[in-house]
């Protein structure tokens, strides 16, 4: 067994080494060149798990040795710590190279990746194994310290899945009601000097029904107090004004009113297209929340692909919930 000591270094050199170690890949080519071995993945995972330097969780000693290729760190007092303990990767027979590819694909590829595609691309023997890996990553893609949406937010709900889209009808038992909140970002176009609005961050969650008891808690949990909330005229949102939010309901109609809340409607349209295009509409209700986590995570980081991979790996390394093929993930 090969051991590599973590030698004491000055604070300056330690900070420099750490900044180099956790620099995220800027392209697929760079990713492929960097993470070609178990050892390379271990080094990166170590930097992700111990950004302030190693400290033994058993005794607090800050000196340790990496047990190369074993996913273990041994401290100076002889305690061994698994690099994957408490992560979605713990107990997996798949190597870290495969896990890193899964995290990169899920967090950076615009159309995402189905389990069938991932199985073929990585040469994984069983579909269930490929699904479980992607599913565990998807379920973990919710930052516990994420900031709530602010300023102006559009909120609406829609049925997702089933043979036909829309309100309850034939095939309604296969549908799931999803509520979406979209942050609006207003800015001045430097060329035209005119004010414009673009879509900011999004939040998506499967809810039991369209009642006030389901919709209001979602909004208050994801939107900052004092924000302006745009909704349609559905009565399930009426209590928002009493929750410290500026509620601006509007009944949608034809003509000019038909374009009300275009941002949230566009999110739903793209979400449904993604589920049909990448996953062929075969996402079950019990697994849908994990797919919503993935969609929102990637959309919110669409301008920062490299950092998105690093963030996804960080969340996967901190995740306590590790759903399996038959288990529904905890809601976002």
Image (cartoon, grey):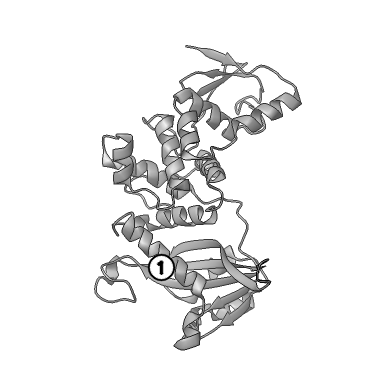
In front: 49, or 183? 183
What count of labels does the image hold?
1
- Which residue is drawn at the image coordinates 49% and 49% (left, top)? 141
Question: What x and y, as percent, mark residue 50?
Answer: 61, 32
Circle 1 residue: 269
280 over 132 or under it: above or below: below
Residue 58 location, x and y as percent? 60, 26
- Tell me: 86 left or right of 10: left
195 or 285, nearer to the observer? 195
Residue placed at 41% from the left, 68% from the top? 269
* Vertical comparison of 90 with 128: above or below: above
| Residues packed near mark 1 inside 10 Å, few (<14), some (14 to 19) or many (20 plus) | few
Q: Is residue 149 left or right of residue 109?
A: right
Q: Is residue 182 visible?
A: yes
Looking at the image, which residue is at 50% across and 34% down? 30
- Which structural element holds mark 1? helix
Residue drawn at (67%, 32%) of the image: 52
Tell me if residue 62 comes above or below residue 214 in the rendering: above
Residue 214 at least partly seen: no
Expressed as whole percent of the image width and height from the top left, the position of residue 294 reads 45, 52
Q: Nearer the viewer, residue 69 or 183?
A: 183
In this orientation, which residue lies closer to the viewer: 207 or 283? Answer: 283
In the rendered image, which quarter is residue 242 located in? bottom right
């Amino acid at each position: 067994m090969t051991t590599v000591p973590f030698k004491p270094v000055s604070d300056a050199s330690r900070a420099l080494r750490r900044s180099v170690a956790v620099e995220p890949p800027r392209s697929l080519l760079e990713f492929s060149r960097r993470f070609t071995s178990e050892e390379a993945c271990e080094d990166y995972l170590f930097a992700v798990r111990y950004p302030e330097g190693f400290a033994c969780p058993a005794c607090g000693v800050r000196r340790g040795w990496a047990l190369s290729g074993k996913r273990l760190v041994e401290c100076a007092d002889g305690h061994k710590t698994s690099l994957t303990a408490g992560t979605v990767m713990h107990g997996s027979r798949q190597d870290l190279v495969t896990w890193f590819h899964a995290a990169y694909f899920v967090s950076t590829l615009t159309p995402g990746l189905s389990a069938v595609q991932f199985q073929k691309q990585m040469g994984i023997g069983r579909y269930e194994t490929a699904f479980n890996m992607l599913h565990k990553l998807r379920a973990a893609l919710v930052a516990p310290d994420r900031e709530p949406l602010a300023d102006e937010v559009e909120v609406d709900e829609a049925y997702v899945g089933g043979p036909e889209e829309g309100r309850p009808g034939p095939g309604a038992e296969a549908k799931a009601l999803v509520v979406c909140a979209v942050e609006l970002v207003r800015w001045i176009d430097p060329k035209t000097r005119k004010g414009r609005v673009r879509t900011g961050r999004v939040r998506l969650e499967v809810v039991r029904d369209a009642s006030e008891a389901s919709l209001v808690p979602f909004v208050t949990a994801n939107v900052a107090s004092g924000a302006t909330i745009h909704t349609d005229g559905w009565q399930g949102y009426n209590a928002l004004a009493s929750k410290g939010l500026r509620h601006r309901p509007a009944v949608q109609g034809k003509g000019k009113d038909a374009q009300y809340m275009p941002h949230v409607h566009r999110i739903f349209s793209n979400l449904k297209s993604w589920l049909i295009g990448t996953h062929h509409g075969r996402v079950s209700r019990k697994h849908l929340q994990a797919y919503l986590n993935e969609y929102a995570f990637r959309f919110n980081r669409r301008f920062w692909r490299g950092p998105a991979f690093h963030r996804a790996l960080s969340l996967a390394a901190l995740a306590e919930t590790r759903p399996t093929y038959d288990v529904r993930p905890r809601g976002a």
